[in-house]
Image (cartoon, rainbow, N blue to C red):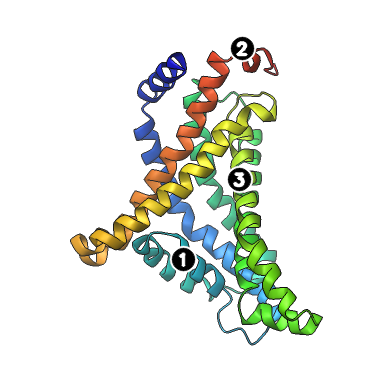
Amino acid sequence: MLLFGQTALRIFLDNNATGLAQQIAYNVLFAVAPLLIFLTAFCGLIIQQVNDEFANPARPILDWLDANLPSDAAEFLQGPVESALTTSPQFLLSIGGVLTLWSAKNAIAAIMSGLNAMYGLEDSRSWLKRNATALLLTIGLAASILVSGLLQLLGTEAGADVAGWLGLGSVWDTAVRWLQWPVTVVLVTLIIVMIHRFAPAFHGPLRWYLPGALLTTLGLGLATFGLQIYFASFGGFSAAYGVFGAVLAFIFWLYVVGLVILAGGIVNATLFKTHPPAKTALVD
């Protein structure tokens, strides 16, 4: 255990994890707008098919942000989401939709670079393979967000309409209440596992990436919950910086997210270096 801790600390310090977390936050910040445009257009496409009287197709996402992110960070995101509502759902089927998703993948590319640094690797993959991996992981992230948002939607008026149409009644409410969060947690954990497995240019059996992925999942939940309490109890950035507080809070939250993801990479990198079964199970 002592060797594990010493190795992990050395990886953290030698590879400037705090600086890499800042780079991740920077890239994610610039990827938020195109990703929100894509997600909102997709939400609009689905909602129009399910309930064309639902006034705001991104309402489930907005409600989810309010309920699960630090208040200042959620406030920052509401404006871009509302602006993205003007995007036609058919945008998804256009070249613009593809280019928007391509722009959003820069956030995943930054995470890939950070995780490679934790392993002490230069990414030797070809330009095509690196960008294809980043794009596929971005699509997976977008899909997990969409499904999570739709699960929240099932507990709203639109979900009640669907339940009535299917004749499910109270069974629907019970199923939604029990399934919303477990399915969301599974989806989030799955995409995090995929990121830890495929983002770094370091190949081993999937099971050896699970410790870092689970640490990341747990860490994201604890960090977000902790920041929620902090902003609610002490006024957060808005009290100190006024109109700029929501922006600063969101950037700070992204920085913490970057640190937590890199911490998961450090755990996996340390495991591969210090645990004999993991070292001998590597795939060349």
Name the element at disc 1: helix
Q: Name the residue under label 1.
A: 67
Q: Do the residues labelled 1 and 3 touch (CB within 8 Å)?
A: no
Q: Nearer the viewer, residue 166 or 191?
A: 166
- The picture places residue 130, in percent across and down from the top left corner, at 61, 35
In this image, 63 relative to 18: left or right? right
- The picture places residue 95, in percent across and down from the top left corner, at 65, 60
The residue lying furthest to the left in this view is 240
Cα–Cα span, label 1 and label 2: 43 Å
Q: Mark 2 points at which residue?
A: 276
Q: Which of marks 1 and 3 is nearer the N terminus?
A: 1
Residue at image point 57% right, 84% down: 55
- Image quarter for residue 162? bottom right
Q: Which of 130 and 155 is in front in this view?
A: 155
Q: Name the residue under label 3.
A: 189
Q: Which quarter of the figure is the C terminus placed in? A: top right
Q: Which of marks 2 and 3 is nearer the N terminus?
A: 3
Residue at image point 60% right, 26% down: 201
Please say if 158 is above or below 135: below
Cα–Cα span, label 2 and label 3: 26 Å
Residue at image point 41% right, 54% down: 225
- The picture places residue 187, in percent across and down from the top left corner, at 64, 51
Q: Do the residues labelled 1 and 2 touch (CB within 8 Å)?
A: no
Q: Nearer the viewer, residue 82 or 147?
A: 147
In this image, 192 relative to 94: left or right? left
Residue at image point 52% right, 59% down: 34
Of the residues shown, which amino acid type is indicated by label 1? Ala
- Image quarter for residue 24? top left
Do we see residue 282 in this rendering?
yes
Name the element at disc 2: helix
- Is disc 2 surrounded by few (<14), some (14 to 19) or many (20+) residues within 10 Å? few
